[in-house]
Amino acid sequence: MALLQVLDASRLYQRARLGYAEAAAERYLDTATLFLAMGGGRWERPDLTRAGREPNRAAVH
């Protein structure tokens, strides 16, 4: 096998791996966006986790 064929095959392989990683990242981003759109992430608010209840609405901007 010629060196150029090996290098081209390696380039194509790396391109395919990059495409896979980009698709996986897009999927995870879409999943996180959907989760947040459905109301996820509330437990990360310190005013909720500290008191264990809904915050005073007048204090929240």
Image (spheres, rainbow, N blue to C red):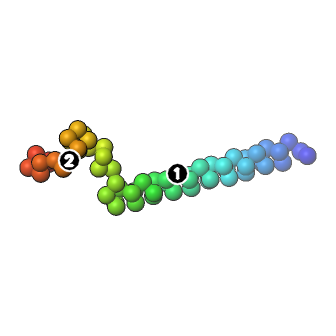
Tag in front: 2 or 1? 2
User: Dot 2, crowdedness within 10 Å: few (<14), some or many (≥20)?
Assistant: few
Amino acid at pointer 2: Arg
Q: Nearer the viewer, residue 11 or 61?
A: 61
Residue 30, position in %: x, y? 45, 58
Q: Which residue lies furthest to the right in this view?
A: 1
Residue 18, position in %: x, y? 62, 49
SS at badge 1: helix
Q: Give the CA distance from mark 2 to mark 1.
A: 34 Å
Amino acid at pointer 1: Ala
Q: Residue at x 12, y 51 (%)?
A: 57
Q: Residue 2, located in which quarter of the rendered image?
A: top right
Q: Nearer the viewer, residue 18 or 60?
A: 60
Identify the residue position indicated by label 2 in the image. Answer: 53
Q: Which residue is drawn at 68% across and 52% down?
A: 16
Classify residue 56 as left or right of residue 2: left
Identify the residue position indicated by label 1 in the image. Answer: 25
Classify residue 12 as left or right of residue 40: right
